[in-house]
Amino acid sequence: MPLGSSKTSKGSGGQSVSASATYRPMDDASLRPFLSTIPAVPDLLGADQARWRVREVGDGNLNLVFIVEGTEGAVVVKQALPYVRLVGESWPLPLERSHYEHRALCEQARLAPGLVPDIYHFDRDLALIVMEFLSPHIIMRKGLVRGIEYPRFAEDVSEFMARMLFGTSVLAGAAAPYKGLVADFAPNVALCRITEDLVFTDPYRDAPLNRWTSPELDNMALSFRKDAPLKRAAQARKYQFMTAAQALLHGDLHTGSVMLTPTNTRIIDPEFACVGPIGFDVGAVLGNLMLAYFAQSGHETTAGARDGYREWLLAQVTQVWRRFEERFIALWRDSTAGEAYVAGLFADAAGQAEMAVERGRFMRTLFEDSAAFAGLKMIRRVLGLAHVEDLESITDPALRARSERRALTLARELVVGAASLSGIAEVTGMARSIEQEIA
């Protein structure tokens, strides 16, 4: 199906990899005149185009990202490329993913206002979004490498997840809008396929794009490919990801998709958005925090220099889960519009008591899901394609491999043993023990 008009559409769009007749990758020369035609942009940047400065700053795996600065302010322009930037034109990718990102951003702004960037313009033909320039925000992952604490992070990301993952489920509203979301995002198959392969399958087979710290992790990589219980658990979670349409996911909610300051948090880059299992987003946050935890020994100048920061990271793991659980339950308890667990059926004291039990059961299952998805997210960042700066920036391969070995050890326990975990305190306790015991 060809790409549609530049206006936001509630239709599903297509998955054609070929560009529309008007698509072209932007550069400095073409971006200036294009932006000048968008009424909001000269007001934001200043009217004098000659003084606009364009910088391409994309350091991700898929897209072009420009910062355009003028005398009055700045905007960010994100444009999809018709291939995976990390790999090249040999891996084509639909431009229509930009439509799903824009659609997700609109939903997120509706349900979690103030926690995503403002959107100024979307051009579907050019697969391009013009959005708020966040300053002095930085990518959270870079801050974690530097050892920066963010007092608002746990509260803000938990609020974002609770509002989105509850608010787009049938626990919150009628079936029709929920099913509309399922229909709208179901065609985002190319991005889902990347997740299905890179998170759930490739680390457990001899995939050509896999890489790891070699030779230090050669034996561990091989053992994971031979680990039948681990592979079974990973594939069971893949089945869940592919079939459990619980809520609208961000789909790629790692610390590289968070921009923040100590006082403000914004969630970015939801192009992997799909309707899937709630625990996938929660697990992504928890897993990336634990990767950052294990990476700290590779960034400290002397042994133990980052002990305090390690504890702060584990505190974030605990606070994110507990605050998310608290807010999700509160939203559920206060809602009367959900199509599932119809409120009128549980109005008396006995019904309320029964619902309290059911919410506890639901959240226990969600904790197990989140723990397992966290482990899978950790494994793919060590043994698959697209590693993380937390670990990659450790220049000494022996130190990097030590951090990665510890991360993989915890990750396997989370994937295989999620059902036996007593709670989030056991997860952080295991992380501490592994950090101390594995050389």
Image: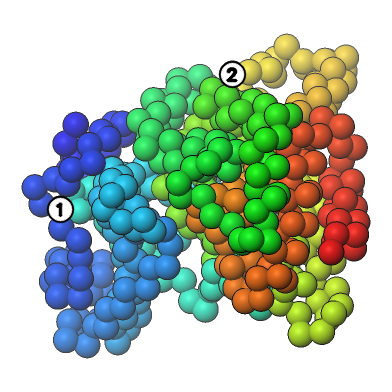
- Asked if residue 331 shows in the view, the reply is no
Q: Secondary structure at mark 1?
A: loop
- At label 1, counting other C-alpha atoms closer than 10 Å, the crowd grade (few under 14, some 14-19, many 20 or more) is some
Which residue bears the numbered disc 2? Answer: 339
Tell me where residue 265 sits by quadrant: bottom right
**What's the amino acid at mark 2?**
Glu
Tell me where residue 171 sits by quadrant: top right
Which residue bears the numbered disc 1? Answer: 23
- At label 2, counting other C-alpha atoms closer than 10 Å, the crowd grade (few under 14, some 14-19, many 20 or more) is some
**Residue at 70% over, 42% down:** 223
**Residue at 81% over, 68% down:** 310
**What's the amino acid at mark 1?**
Tyr
Q: Residue furthest left?
A: 21
**Residue at 85% over, 79% down:** 303
Q: Position of residue 63 (x, y in %)?
A: 34, 59
Q: Secondary structure at mark 2?
A: loop
Q: Position of residue 364 (x, y in %)?
A: 80, 31
Q: Position of residue 314 (x, y in %)?
A: 81, 60
- Asked if residue 13 shows in the view, the reply is yes
Q: Nearer the viewer, residue 37 or 126?
A: 126
**Residue at 26% over, 66% down:** 40
**Is 39 on the left-hand or right-hand side of 236?**
left
